[in-house]
Image (cartoon, rainbow, N blue to C red):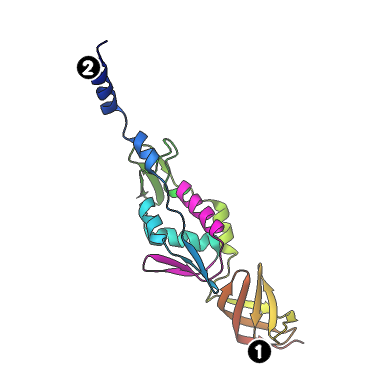
Amino acid sequence: MADNDYLALLDRAKQVLPETIENHERFELPDLDILQEGKTTVFRNFIDVTDKLRRDPQHLLQFLLRELGTPGSTEGRRAVFKAKISPASINEKIQSYTETYVICSECGLPDTKVIKEDRTLVLECEACGARRSINVRKAAKAEARDVLRVGDTIELLISDIGKKGDGVGKHLEYIVVVPGTSKGNRVTVKITNISGKTAFGAITLEKPAQ
């Protein structure tokens, strides 16, 4: 076969190759730029990640807040979490989000969009045309019920007194510190701050120990 004929066939083959082959190579999330500032964690390139995923920043933010069990918000191109969270934990949750809401289960590409049909979210692939319902992990919903949030009001038994004289109790997996109360008292507490698995609250109602 002449060289010219071979090159012509090669060009024709390239023209009919699916574009998705090249698309697969280009998808790579930016390295997460995460900084801890005191009792908060700042995800400095949050919007860069959502741009790459082609998803609504608020959708990803709410997913992360639920999965990580912390309050937070966006500030410009950053996301700020009101707790100390390791970069590895945030990265793990973003990978979970990507697998659930972005990656096509048929061709493995990220060229997808989320659409709503009745009450069901559907992931539709623009590369291969595959469609699948989005099944949010039941485990994530169960975890959300076991999360304490700033602003929550809880009933608490003060079981101990801390070194600074503050009352201490246990709620779910959280140690709750409540100034101005005594051991053995049952109190109604509004959560004012959370750092990891330690929460801080203010008394709204107190029942003295009997």
Give SS at disc 2. helix
The quarter of the image holding the N terminus is top left
Q: Is residue 49 magenta?
A: no
Q: Is residue 48 left or right of residue 163?
A: left
Q: Does 30 sit above or below residue 17?
A: below
Q: Residues within 10 Å of mark 1 (few under 14, many from 20)?
A: few
Question: Can you give x and y, in whole percent of width and height, for residue 114 in the image?
Answer: 37, 49
Residues 30 and 94: in front is 30
Residue at screen point 45% across, 62% down: 62
Residue that mark 1 sits on = 180
Callout 1 secondary element: loop
Image quadrant of residue 207?
bottom right
The magenta stretch is 70-99
**Residue 93 in view of the camera:** yes
Which residue is at a point 70% across and 86% down the rendered structure image?
164
Q: Position of residue 189 (x, y in %)?
A: 60, 81
Residue 136, visible in the rendered structure: no
Q: Quadrant of the C terminus?
A: bottom right
Is 133 placed above or below 163 here?
above
Which residue corresponds to the image point at 53% horizontal and 67% vertical from the top-left? 70
Q: CA distance from mark 1 to mark 2?
A: 89 Å
Question: Residue 110: percent from the left, percent from the top?
Answer: 39, 44
Amino acid marked by disc 1: Gly
Front-lying residue, 207 or 34: 34
Q: Residues within 10 Å of mark 2 (few under 14, many from 20)?
A: few
93 in the magenta segment: yes
Q: Quadrant of residue 3?
A: top left
Q: Position of residue 117 (x, y in %)?
A: 36, 48
Q: Residue at x 43, y 64 (%)?
A: 44
The residue labelled by disc 2 is 4
